[in-house]
Image: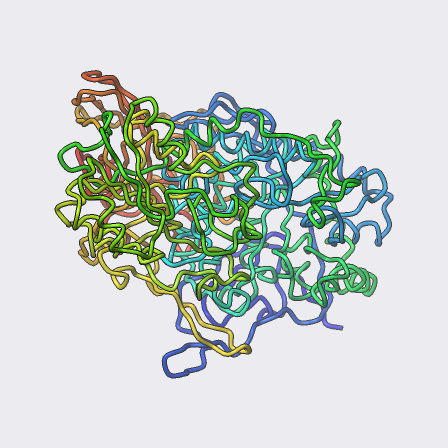
Amino acid sequence: MRSHRLSSVLLLLPLVTGQSTGSASSTSSTLATTSSATTSGSAFTAIPGLATETGPLTLPISEYTFSPWPTPSLAPDPPVFPATDPLYPPPVSADPQIVPDFGPAWAVAHAKAQALIANFTIWDKVNLTTGIDGLCVGNIGAVGGFPGLCLEDSPLGVRYTDFVTAFPAGITTASTWNRALMRTRGLYMGSEFKGKGAHVALGPMMNMGRIAQGGRNWEGFGADPFLSGETAHETVLGMQAGGVQATAKHYINNEQEWKRTMESSNVDDRTEHEIYAQPFMRAVMGGVSSVMCSYNLINDTYACNNNKTLNDMMKREIGFQGYVQSDWTATMATLSAVAGLDMTMPGGINFGENASYFGGNLTAFVMNDTISMERLDDMATRIVAAWYYMHQDEDYPPVSFNMNDPLDPATNFHINVQSDHYTVVREIGAAGTVLLKNERGVLPLDKPRSLVLVGSDAGPPTSGPNEYVDQGGDPSGILAMGWGSGTDNFTYLISPYEAIQARAREDQTSVFWNFNDWDLDAAGNDVIGMEVAIVFVNSDSGEGYITVDGNAGDRQNLTAWHQGDDLILAVAAQNNNTIVVTNSVGPLILEPWIEHPNVTAVVWASLGGNEAGNAIMDILYGNWNPSGKLPYTLAKSPMDYPAQLVLGGTEADILSINYTEGLMIDYRWFDAMNITPRYEFGFGLSYTTFEFSDLAITKVAPLDYAETDLVNNWENGGASPIAEGSSTALWLHMPAYQVTFNVQNTGAVYGGEIPQLYLHHPASAMEPPSILKGFTNIELSPGETQRASITLSRYDLSIWDVVRQGWAKPNGTIAFSVGASSRDFRLNGTIPE
């Protein structure tokens, strides 16, 4: 049998359509540079109106040797690079300047894991990698002194159990642009998973909002890699401080639900690195324990069988020390183990042929030397190491719920893990709400004599907060999360109707309501003579295994559900103080009514979790001065977006989804194409005003030891080397420049602003006109001025060089702007040479 070696050090294959790990007959363990420049190689089949692939590319059956990946070798050096235990991360900062070093903690954990499995049999080790049926969504059985693992959804709370918190969705959290809130949400969520006995939380989700209609966008953190990466980083730090293993998912390019298991996301190398990999890289820099590979193909190779993305990018380049698990039934071959997959899920007898790729087949492949024993040891070690790394060998609570039968008294112990977590739910719900319009200062409300609530989204669901399994149905009340596996059960749900009623009692306001979305005449008549009319509309989406009103996960359009546009117009026709509140999974087209003279205010409330109504009330009445910013662009037309949902195809077709927009995702496209949005990325109003002044930038002296030769090489135009951990190296991410400026509250009330920093690269770099590379948050009393800072790293200033396969500083002058959104720049400067 011909021997193949998929090098544990490097296998650089062009990340282009039509090329696969199976195309190389052998590789050397010697480091070698090869170009990953985009080429036109293609496996497309031309079908009128629809591009499809000829079929997935796979690894050939052969013998594959393996050498373990090297462990990080740079010594910790506080305060910038401190040795960090995942249970005790660095304090949160609005301007992070610490690069936590999880290397020592991983080294200790790997040593313990190697000692534990030293006497395990092949079958024992295989059992560590193969899911079984059990109490949780995913389960690894007990082996020797290892008690097994409980893997459980979701990215916003513990799924399929009771007495848990329904946290605000990822998209709402990103809309806060507030690292402290991101961290606290993660901490509280992690503690709930641990309290229920789950070892592995299947979140956070960090796929990009490339397509406005994408069904699971609401689980993630928006349409910009920097914002998404920072939110992922803080969420992971928080979750793991709470004691649970976090999972970065879905790696990678899983940006739509339609035919997600039968589509190839065709992405060029530079775009992959600069856009889609960045959130996962930041999760790894946050010490994440596990990475979940996705359902889709990437350049014709399934994500869980993709040596380029798993071995070369994630484990070599990003330096990931934990384990890669499959999405549920996403394992497509036993040889996925060679390509970098460490654990297959869910396994068990109930999941057909996908359950059999590991288990007995993996055992056979190891015994006949197709897969080496060294690789099996590596898989088992990574899985057990994550358990030690998170100190789950130290009095971790047992699993206390049964997701298969939540009412079974023998296996459900109804442990209450909520504590006072509702406080951060309410705070994020308010901080993540974006004020889009506020004509004549109609908000905040000041003890109105009368108001009317219109629309079903104002009220509670008609049959309780959990009226559909996995929230998979047409919402009959307030929309506070999307649908699918990214959900959990509401213990309770506060609607705007309840929250506003309670406030109205204090203000002695007369309150009326009409929750009927369909009787437009009645809605119009009910608002006549009212001091305030508040219309609530929503738009829902979710995971593709559930179809709601023809929406198979992804949204069919970008209009409000339940004829929301018509409802708003019917009310605005009869009331000159019409306020619109939206609870939406993502962008909507607001053009039918946004410029109506009677629509005086628009409140973009996203998905607020179980305190959604209270958070909306806090914004409407000024208990919280709006500080949220849009994590995506609101366009004037769906066709203004750079990428559209790809539909069609037969059951056998593998759809081609070509990321032809490259780096020009979301606002970058609008800027490059000079398209005027309705509301730009980063936009958000306040009840006060802010002024920026006195910009300065200083170069931060590098640490004495910090790989000065690499710093000098970069400053002289060189690229980062091809090496283990090259994309997460300290010299690349340590502070390099600090931008400082004054922010003054020039209004009459206390409030917070989110200053944002955008880079403008020289034209030769072929970057978008503006790219977000920093933000901070600042809270000020009326008239108060504070100095704010945003720190930039060499990574922030770099672009991915596809020829040299490294991060390099572009030639020419790099300019930057600081302002209140991607199109509201207040201060301008240049990066010093």
Question: What colour scheme has been applied to the protein in the rendered image?
Answer: rainbow
**What quarter of the picture does the C terminus occupy?**
top left
The mark tally for this picture is 0
**What quarter of the picture does the N terminus occupy?**
bottom right
* Quadrant assignment, res 2: bottom right
Residue 7, position in %: x, y? 63, 57
Q: Is residue 58 above or below residue 824?
A: below
* Quadrant assignment, res 227: top left
Residue 504, position in %: x, y? 32, 27
Observer-nearest of 487 and 507: 507
Observer-nearest of 459 and 230: 459
Please indicate whether residue 785 sits to the left or right of residue 70 in the image: left
Please indicate whether residue 38 sits to the left or right of residue 641 in the image: right
Residue 168, position in %: x, y? 46, 38
Give me the residue at 54% from left, 40% from top: 490
Do we see residue 563 in this rendering? Answer: yes
Please indicate whether residue 414 sits to the left or right of residue 693 in the image: right
Residue 661, position in %: x, y? 32, 62
Give me the residue at 38% from left, 27% from top: 502
Do we see residue 765 in this rendering? Answer: no
Q: Is residue 448 above or below residue 466?
A: above
Please indicate whether residue 158 sits to the left or right of residue 760 in the image: right
Q: Is residue 400 above or below residue 467?
A: above
Give me the residue at 64% from left, 41% from top: 161
